[in-house]
Amino acid sequence: MTDSVVKIHRFSTVLFLMANVERKLHIWTDGACKGNPGPGGWGAYLVWGERSLELCGGEAQTTNNQMELTAVIEALSAIKRPVPMVLHLDSQYVKNGILEWMPNWKRRGWKTAAGKPVKNVELWQTLDQLVSTHDIEWRWVKGHAGEAGNEKADELANRGVPQTK
């Protein structure tokens, strides 16, 4: 699925007080696309206390929605054991898909209310499997509004785009 993935391990100099106080893993994800469809990237920023992990990658031909989904999939795939987590995302598409639409899609055999196949069904099914193994608190954040974790995920997603040569 992914043409390239870059993992950058480092200790963050930025401390997220929520992560320190709650002892929850905080994840911010984002997707980016230069043209829709076109070259795209995804980014995920994971913070546990003072530790952080940056993930990014991209594809030569994709859509923004596919990159938004891929960012969440890659972030959840990087987690090696169950931990309490908060997933911050700015994608209404992913948020609504997970929290509202998916139960009905599954009940209808991955069809929409209009009886049409769900777009990006393979990604949704992968995400469904990953979500079932984690205890996730979903938090929607407004994109490009100065929220530090979201801005980092956006930076990573855009970093993923040029890697699609």
Image (cartoon, helix red, strand yellow):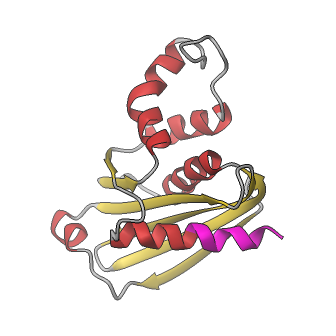
Q: Residue at x 39, y 28 (%)?
A: 100
Quarter of the image for residue 35 reads: bottom right
Q: Position of residue 22 (x, y in %)?
A: 18, 63
Q: Please state the extent of the stretch shown in magenta in the rendering.
A: 157-165
Numbered circles on residues, count: 0
Q: Foreground residue, 79 or 3?
A: 3
Quarter of the figure that contains the C terminus: bottom right
Residue 6 appears in the picture as rendered: no
Q: Is residue 79 left or right of residue 122?
A: left
Magenta stretch: helix, strand or loop mostly: helix
The residue positioned 15% from the left and 69% from the top of the image is 21
Q: Quadrant of residue 24?
A: bottom left
Residue at image coords 29%, 53%: 84
Q: Quadrant of residue 158?
A: bottom right
Compared to residue 81, the image places residue 10 above or below, namely: below
Q: Can residue 147 be spotted in the picture?
A: yes
As drawn, which residue projects farthest toward the right? 165
At x 66%, y 65%, the residue is 57
Front position in the image: 31 or 144: 144
Residue 9 position in % (x across, y down): 51, 80
Indicate yes or no whether the magenta region holds residue 162. yes
Residue 32 image point, x, y percent: 60, 60
Image x and y of residue 38, in percent: 76, 55
- Based on the picture, tell me whether residue 127 belongs to the magenta stretch: no
